[in-house]
Amino acid sequence: MNRLRPINLDNGVTIIHPLRQSDILRHDQIVDNLIEILSDEENTRFISEKRTDDKERVSNELLGVTFRYDQQLGYTHFITLKNNNEVLGQINIITPKGIETETQYKIKDTWFIEYYLNKKVWNLGVMSGAIKAIVESMKDQGITKISALCMPENIGSIKILTKSGFKRTQKFDLKQDVYELQLG
């Protein structure tokens, strides 16, 4: 199974959602919100390859979301503040068919999850709640294994993963460990 139904969750303060038709009208705002996150060194300390202040690059990546969805390679979900539509973070779900799973990760038969969050809402439970909800929705859709990569010094992300039931299973490379969650 590589098809994931869109996940839409609303906790009253934030919304987790895929790219919606209404978001097309907010394209520039979403790009600006993502640039705020991705251009900040502290936000991207553990994902330096994503660090950028290039609006065109972020805009193009945003347009690529629909391609990856259509090709069943990955599903991007945004964490949006409900009262003003500010994008606070992003959760990427990469299918076993996804390009990264086959070529970059070299780990088969698993779904991968990646995420980042604006530092202004760190330590408020936003990402922990989002990951738990995403995992539950994936389980309800029949997904049985989810993996994530995490650097040992990324204590915040390790806490998020372990709170959601992930366990460190192996070294991935010199910088990262693999965390896995078996569902059902």
Image (cartoon, grey):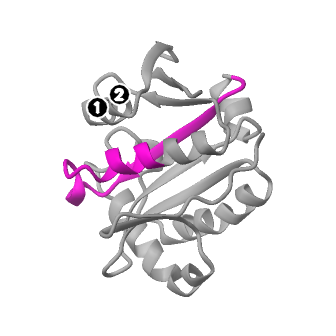
State the quadrant of the N terminus: top right
Q: For the residue marked with disc 2, what is the amino acid?
A: Thr
Q: Is residue 126 magenta?
A: yes
Where residue 162 is drawn, which disc sits there?
2
Camera-side residue of 75 and 134? 134
Q: Who's the residue at 30% across and 69% down the image?
A: 13
Is disc 2 in contact with disc 1, using a CB cutoff of under 8 Å? Answer: yes
- Reply yes or no: does residue 124 show up in magenta: yes
Residue on which disc 1 sits = 159
Task: Calculate the distance from the C-alpha at mark 2 to the C-alpha at mark 1.
Answer: 5 Å
Q: Is residue 127 visible?
A: yes
Q: Residues within 10 Å of mark 1 (few under 14, many from 20)?
A: few
- Above or below, 56 relative to 125: below
Q: Residue at x 55, y 87 (%)?
A: 25
What percent of the width, then of the height, locates residue 169? 48, 13
Foreground: 172 or 81? 81
